[in-house]
Amino acid sequence: MRRASLRRVGDPFMRKSFLKKLTALVLAGCMLLALTACGAPGKRTEGKYPFKTVRMIVPYGTNGTTDLVGRKLGAALGRALGVSVVIDNQPGASGSLGCRAALDAPRDGSVLLFAADSLGTQRVMGISDMSYDDFDPVYAVANDVKVIVVAKKSPYQTIEDLLAAIKAAPDTVQMAYTGPGGSGHVQALIMNEFGYSPALTAYSSGSDGIVAVISGQVVFTNANFSTVADYIEAGELRLLAVCATERMEKYPDVPALVEVMPGSEKLLSIPYTPLSLLVADGVPENVQAMLRNACEEAFRDSEFVEFMDSNSIEKLYEKYRTVEETRAFYREWESTVCWLMADAKATAVSPAEFGIARPAA
């Protein structure tokens, strides 16, 4: 009987049936292990975050202030998380293309957005329907102060010289900027408020505008300091003023613009190039908390701190410590800037259409 039973098991038909059952059991076991590791649908991040690679979208081209600060933050953030943070430049339409890509990405923390100020003006400019409200702030990170520079061969030796020329010949002294709605445009509108009307000449990027000043195509620009620091050091550009209420520690002899434009304190006191790390609304709270903790470690990273200090970049993360404080800052910023632009008839839509309150008198 035993030999007959052995012969039946060894029969080709029986062997084939046995292998099928064994294969089915193995596949079922693998599926169970996969489900256990991955968790239920919609909870991809549980037990997995941070992923091996995190993508940070910078909605502008390379070598601008958003890109430069974003890359330094990305490197420090990667060291804090222990993963690779890849910078993905997606320029176009005043930053709206990259912002849209971040908003449409999976909401699991795998895609971050390092945005500049244009996210707060896109709606009123008619560029997109997005705003800070579509994202959750991880941190307001930096403000790269605006400065006024001219070429080394410029006849204007001081900010008083330049302003006098603009006052004497309105709409003729050419200023490079990156287009409507950006920080350069807003700074020009502030100058308009005090009787100075430069001739605005748009360039596709801040770096192109800087080249235009150096080559003599335009007279001046109000660039972010980090993008012109090396040119100033090399003597290619002359620093005339800091567009703020205080002088820079690095250049104590260069006046703040408020010193030559009395009454501009309120308008010059806010950061006009706020750079923020955000995620699309709906990214799990535990992932956001992990990103905030990683940022706090990144903000202590020696390479990141040295970059911020050497470029005189304001550390907004020291000023706005919580999500609630950051959201309040965005509301105040949108109120000030959007109504400044609207009153100058530089918007496509009134801020009131979006419930943006007019700033208190």
Image (tube, grey):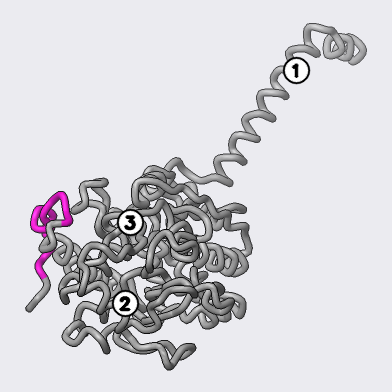
Which mark is on residue 162?
2
Residue 146's x, y, as percent? 37, 74
Front residue of 290/16: it is 290
Could you classify mark 2 by the number of other residues whose Cα lies within 10 Å: few (under 14), some (14-19), or many (20 or more)? many
- Disc marking residue 18: 1
Residue type beneath disc 3:
Thr
Q: Earlier in the sequence, mark 1 or mark 3?
A: 1
Q: CA distance from mark 1 to mark 2?
A: 90 Å
Q: Main secondary structure of the magenta part?
A: loop
Q: Which residues are magenta?
A: 346-358
Mark 3 and mark 2: span between their CA atoms? Answer: 17 Å
Q: CA distance from mark 1 to mark 3?
A: 79 Å
The residue sitting at 92% across, 12% down in the picture is 3
Of residues 20 and 183, the one drawn nearer to the viewer in this rendering: 183
Number of numbered markers: 3
Tag 2: amino acid = Leu
Can residue 45 be seen from the camera position used here? no
Residue 225 position, x and y percent, is 45, 74
Instruction: Give the left or right position of residue 359, taking residue 102 as reference.
Output: left
Q: Secondary structure at mark 3?
A: strand
Q: Is residue 256 magenta?
A: no
| Residue at position x 25%, y 86% in the image | 260
Residue located beneath label 3 in the image? 201
Give the image quarter of residue 87: bottom right
* Along the viewing direction, whichever of 83 and 199 lies nearer the viewer: 199
Which residue corresponds to the image point at 21% horizontal and 51% vertical from the top-left? 125
Residue 130 placed where, x, y %? 27, 50
Q: Residue 344, image x and y in percent?
A: 13, 62
